Image (tube, rainbow, N blue to C red):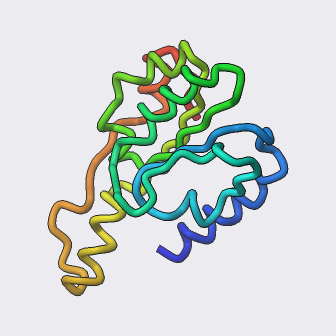
Amino acid sequence: MLGAEWTWRKKSNHQRGRRPRLSHPHSDSGRGAYDQLDFLEPQTMFGTLDIGCIGAAFPKAIGVKMARPARPVVSVSGEGGFFMNPQAIETSVRWGVVNIVMNNNSWGSEKTSQKVLYEGRYVEADITNPRYEQFAELCGARGF
């Protein structure tokens, strides 16, 4: 877990100077985006804070892009949250929404809770995923 956090921090620090000033980052549950991204202008971060709405970032990002089509919009999700709305990838391609999917092959928030509350006795916290880059390409997006 510490390695993943360090990698995310390293990547976001590297990207801070590259993100367009008036872009709109979005995230699902979890604190990674809130702790690691800079929000340079008012009303440029749209998130669920501590409500934990898994799967909300992707469709929410599309809605903000429709409301503010001239501004770049980025959605950051874990694979579990992203795959709650996979059909929306076609819409995001048409509207130009960038989607970043962080894949750790688990329901990250749930696994963390099970680690803390149940001494690491995990129940259905680990998941198997499709090849997201191939899925993106099937829907007309560029996958990496």
The location of residue 140, given as percent across then percent down, is: 51, 14
Query: In the rendered view, does 28 fall on the left or right side of 99?
Result: left
Q: Residue 66 lies in what quarter of the image?
A: top right
Query: In the rendered view, does 49 fall on the left or right side of 120?
Result: right
All told, the count of numbered labels is 0
> Image point 77% across, 43% down: which residue?
19
> Image point 24% across, 75% down: which residue?
114
The location of residue 28, given as percent across then percent down, is: 43, 50
Q: Residue pushed farthest left?
A: 123
Of 105 and 99, the residue lying toward us: 99
Q: Residue 108 lies in what quarter of the image?
A: bottom left
Of 143 and 61, the residue lying toward us: 61
Q: Quadrant of the C terminus?
A: top right
Q: Residue 135 lies in what quarter of the image?
A: top left
Q: Residue pushed farthest front?
A: 42
The location of residue 26, given as percent across then percent down, is: 54, 44
Query: In the rendered view, does 117 fall on the left or right side of 74?
Result: left
